[in-house]
Structures are given as C-alpha cells and as structure tokens.
Image (cartoon, rainbow, N blue to C red):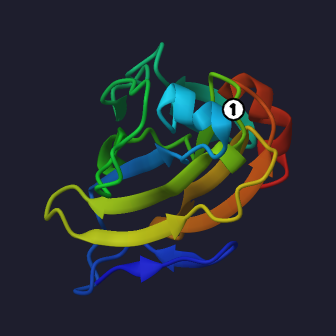
Amino acid sequence: MTVNLGKGQQISLSKSDGSSLTAVRMGLGWQAAPRKGFLAKLTGGGGAIDLDASAVLFASGQPADVVFFQHLTSDDGSVRHTGDNLVGGAGAGDDDEVVLVDLARVPAHIDQIVFTVNSFTGQTFAEVQNAFCRLVDETTGAELARYTLTGGGDHTAQIMAKVYRSGGGWRMKAIGEPASGRTFQDLLPSIAAHL
C-alpha cells in the first residue's frame, strides 16, 4: 500500500512484519508542460526538459559521496543511478530516472542520503508537470511512498526527500523544498538546512 507523502511527512522503512527493507528504488518521473499561445502552435507544444536525479550521501552532516548522471555508482557500490533521461516521460507515470539504494550495503558512517532533482537545462518547474518521486521496495516491487511535486514555480530544483538512519533501521522524510541550481553542487547550501 502506497503512502502519499505531504511535505515534511516521515515514514519508517520497516516492513509490516517488522523486518527492515534491504534495497529501495527512488524513482523520479516528469513531463514537459504543454506550451500555450502562438509560439506553441509553431513549435508543436511542449519541449524536452532534462531533469536530473541525484543522491548525496552524508556522514555526520558532511557530503561524503554523490550519485548523479556523471558518477553513476557510489564509491562503495551501495547506491547506483541507472542513467540519465534527457527529455522526461510521456506521462505514463513510469520512472524516468532511478536511483537504487542497497540499504544493507550502505557503509555505517553514511547516516543520510538526500535525493534531489534539478533542471539541468534551466527550465523552471512552471514548465514541468506530473513530476513525482517514489520509493519502491526493490525486493518485492511494492511502492512504499510517493511524493508528488506540485505548484510549479520559478525554481529550477527541488530537494525531494531523504532516507536516514534511525535506531537500527532507516526512515524516509519527504522534504519537497524548492531550490535553485542546475546541479547537485548548487543545492548543497539548501540541503544543509534539512540534515
């Protein structure tokens, strides 16, 4: 059963039988919003929007590693990006970019993994529609949580969510904080407020 998360909402990543999840998939999907007006008729409507998903691994509040389109696997191999999507989806609700996290292999010193999305091509989220991130149990394929990006706006990035250690397991928090930047590096000052 999927939990539709609101901004700031948290969920435990324990299974219903009390055991912990071992591997999760953070999926990101989006579409270019249709353009309106005379120019849209000439150009055929919406254009391609290159959103990029990144996962920044933190140890005691400091960035320790990152997974994004130019570094597809974390140094320890526990987090992996499946590849860059340069245009977004056709609105079918499928994941356009995916970051896989093997929670059991994440090194003990990594205590948080923050997921971001940024518009590499510089379009604002006013030009994006049907954007979401979702967390899936990679073992069973069951969707655990979904956070829908709403409101558009003139920002070019979003700090979507984080998974973090809590007790002996992991939790997820939907952050949903607008930011500005074309790359994850641009977002590091904004991420710091959510660690």
Residue 131: % across, % down: 51, 54
Tell me what residue is drawn at x 53 percent, y 70 percent.
Answer: 167
With 187 as the anchor, is 30 left or right in this view? left
Q: Position of residue 2 (x, y in %)?
A: 34, 79
Residue at left offset 43%, top offset 19%: 75
Quarter of the image where the N terminus is located:
bottom left
Please give left or right for residue 63 compared with residue 170 in the image. Answer: right
Residue 65 rendering spot, x and y as whole percentages: 57, 25
Residue identified by numbered label 1: 123
Report x, y in % for residue 71: 46, 16
In the rendered image, the vertical position of residue 128 relative to residue 86, given as above or below: below
Residue at 44%, 38% (x, y): give it: 107
Nearest the eye: 34 or 67: 34
Q: Residue furthest top?
A: 70
Judging from the image, what secondary structure is the residue with disc 1 in?
loop
> Residue drawn at (64%, 44%), measured in percent from left and top?
127
